[in-house]
Image: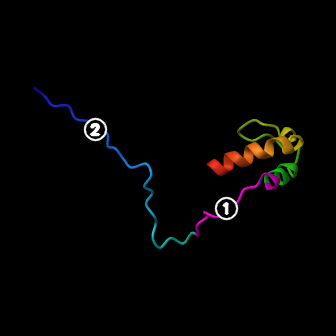
Amino acid sequence: MAVLKSVFTREDKFYIPSLHDTPYSSISDLHISKEGVAKLLKEFNPNKASGPDKIPCRLLKELAGELAPIVAALFRHS
């Protein structure tokens, strides 16, 4: 009788190896505020073409105040 074995391994999802002697600084203290996101969205040029997400720049600029809390939360959680 054959014994079945899995080809998959179980990895610890919470262990992230650190890179020693890296030339890059840590960004753990990065702060993303809804006010900062709103400011950046309001600076969009409404005459520019949409990006790969197909969301018009004019829409992002005009709804900056309403979208900023959502976009800031998405960036904080990513």
Find the distance from the CA under tag 2 to the CA under tag 1. Answer: 39 Å
Dot 2 crowding, Cα within 10 Å, few <14, some 14–19, many 20+: few
Q: Residue at x 85, y 54 (%)?
A: 39
Up the image or down, 56 lies above or below 33; here it is above
- Relative to 74, is 1 above or below? above
User: Which of the two residues, 43 or 49, is positioned nearer the viewer here?
Assistant: 43
Q: Residues within 10 Å of mark 1 (few under 14, many from 20)?
A: few
Query: Could you say which quadrant of the image residue 65 lies in?
Result: top right
Q: Amino acid at mark 1?
A: Leu
Residue 18 in the figure: left or right of residue 30:
left
Closest to the observer, 18 or 12: 12
Give the residue type that dot 2 points to: Val
Image coordinates of residue 47 in percent, x first then y, are 89, 43
Q: Position of residue 17 (x, y in %)?
A: 43, 60
Residue shown at the point (76%, 55%) measured from the top left: 33
Badge 1 marks a residue whose secondary structure is loop
Q: Residue at x 70, y 47 (%)?
A: 73
Task: Find the magenta span and give its range.
Answer: 25-36
Q: Position of residue 66 (x, y in %)?
A: 84, 41
Which mark is on residue 7?
A: 2
The residue tagged 1 is 30
- Numbered disc 2: secondary structure: loop
